[in-house]
Amino acid sequence: MRHIVKRAGHTEPFDEKKVYAAVFSACTALREPAASAELIADKVVKEVNQWIEKKHEVTANDIRNQASKHLENYNPDAAYLFKHHRIVS
């Protein structure tokens, strides 16, 4: 099981659902159609999972940076929103 080091210093298991939800929210906040946002979120989660498999330990910030890097390929504005805003609604 992959663990993430959080900002407060504690660890928790990696939950790809959180990455998916955050990417989906960033996309839909910018009026990306829901079906398109779902496809983008799926792709970004797959890319983050491939990246994280090679790591022993990562931080939540590392995951945020990787996800935004991959999201940039699909929706640059959503990538900016994802990277710079902690709460997207």
Image: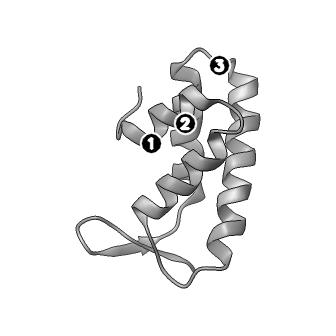
The number of numbered badges drawn on the structure is 3
Residue 64 in the image: x percent, y percent?
48, 53
Image quarter of residue 16 = bottom right
Whether residue 22 is situated above or below residue 5 in the rendered picture: above
* Residue 7 as seen in the image, left or right of residue 54: left
Which SS class for mark 2? helix
Give the foreground label among 3 and 1.
1
Q: Of the residues under marks 3 and 1, which one precedes in the sequence?
A: 3
State the residue at coordinates (65%, 30%).
75
- Specify the quadrant that holds the C terminus: top left
Q: Pinpoint residue 55: horizontal percent, then vertical percent.
A: 59, 80
| Residue assigned mark 2 | 79
Kind of residue at badge 1 = Lys
Please say which color scheme the image uses.
one colour
Q: CA distance from mark 2 to mark 3?
A: 12 Å
Q: Are marks 2 and 3 in contact (CB under 8 Å)?
A: no
User: What's the amino acid at mark 2?
Assistant: Ala
In the rendered image, which residue does mark 1 sit on?
Answer: 83
Element carrying mark 3: loop
Look at mark 3 in the image and give the residue it sits on: 32
On the image, the x and y values in percent for residue 9 come to: 26, 74
Q: In this rendering, is residue 53 above or below 41? A: below
Question: Callout 3, which amino acid?
Answer: Glu
Q: Are marks 1 and 2 in contact (CB under 8 Å)?
A: yes
Q: Residues within 10 Å of mark 1 (few under 14, many from 20)?
A: some
